[in-house]
């Protein structure tokens, strides 16, 4: 059996991934967070479905950095320099994006750690005094409804 035939018969594993982990320059500062294992090793066996919440919802590159603020159970997504609150905008975008993601039937998702938009565990949530605690989940994974 040729490599091509073998490939055709293998079921495709479809994984969502935070876009910056694939090396796309979508971060707030115009950079990326390419993960060589994901790109060079795992990438040979899976089909990636890249998602960058902040870029796709229209914040552009570069942009002001964001943080989670307030109640860790229901934090706000705030741009601290300008004071802009992007929570509703992000939630509305995520609702629509999740319909597309559900139609693809992903087998899993690789999230960029620490991000207030994409991070899954132990994302910093700031209290009213500006003190962070690593107790949060980014807005997009929260919307995915992943059981923690
Ligand atoms: S929002 Fe997520 S995918 Fe986009 S740059 Fe930040 S961590 Fe990466």
Image (cartoon, rainbow, N blue to C red):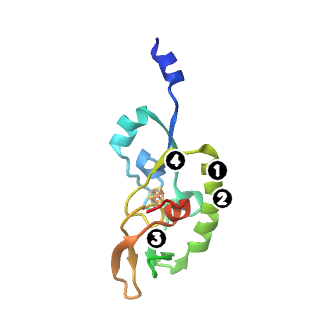
| Pair 1/4: label in front | 1
Given contact means CB atoms under 8 Å apart, are the residues at marks 2 and 1 in contact? yes
Q: Nearer the viewer, residue 13 or 89?
A: 13
| Pair 2/3: label in front | 2
Which one is earlier in the sequence, the residue at label 4 or at label 3? Answer: 4
Relative to 11, does residue 87 appear above or below in the rendering?
below
Which one is earlier in the sequence, the residue at label 3 or at label 1? Answer: 3
Res. 50 mark: 4
Q: Between marks 1 and 4, how big is the CA–CA gap?
A: 12 Å
Res. 33 mark: none
Which one is earlier in the sequence, the residue at label 1 or at label 4? Answer: 4
Residue at the extreme top: 1
Badge 3 density bin: few <14, some 14–19, many ≥20, Cα 10 Å? many
Label 3 C-beta lies within 8 Å of the nearest ligand 1 atom: no
Label 4 C-beta lies within 8 Å of the nearest ligand 1 atom: yes
| Pair 3/1: label in front | 1
Badge 1 density bin: few <14, some 14–19, many ≥20, Cα 10 Å? few
The residue that appears at 54% across and 78% down in the rendered structure is 84
Which one is earlier in the sequence, the residue at label 2 or at label 4? Answer: 4
Classify mark 4: helix, strand or loop. Answer: strand
Relative to 34, does residue 43 appear above or below in the rendering?
above
| Pair 2/4: label in front | 2
Q: Between marks 3 and 1, how big is the CA–CA gap?
A: 25 Å
Return the residue at label 2.
96
Which one is earlier in the sequence, the residue at label 2 or at label 3? Answer: 3
Given contact means CB atoms under 8 Å apart, are the residues at marks 3 and 1 in contact? no
Q: Based on the displayed image, in which of its 4 quarters is residue 126 positioned?
A: bottom left
Return the residue at label 3.
66
């Amino acid at each position: 059996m040729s490599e091509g035939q073998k490939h055709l018969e293998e079921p495709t594993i479809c994984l969502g991934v935070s876009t910056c982990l694939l090396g796309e320059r979508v971060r707030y500062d115009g950079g990326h967070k390419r993960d060589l294992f994901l790109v060079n090793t795992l990438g040979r066996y899976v089909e990636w479905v890249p998602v960058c919440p902040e870029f796709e919802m229209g914040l552009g590159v570069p942009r002001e950095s964001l943080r989670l603020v307030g109640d860790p159970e229901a934090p706000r997504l705030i741009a601290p320099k300008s004071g802009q609150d992007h929570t509703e905008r992000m939630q509305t975008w995520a609702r629509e994006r999740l319909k597309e993601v559900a139609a693809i039937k992903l087998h899993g998702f690789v999230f960029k750690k620490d991000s207030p938009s994409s991070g899954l565990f132990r994302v910093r949530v700031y209290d009213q005094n500006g003190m962070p605690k690593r107790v949060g989940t980014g807005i997009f994974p929260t919307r995915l409804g992943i059981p923690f």
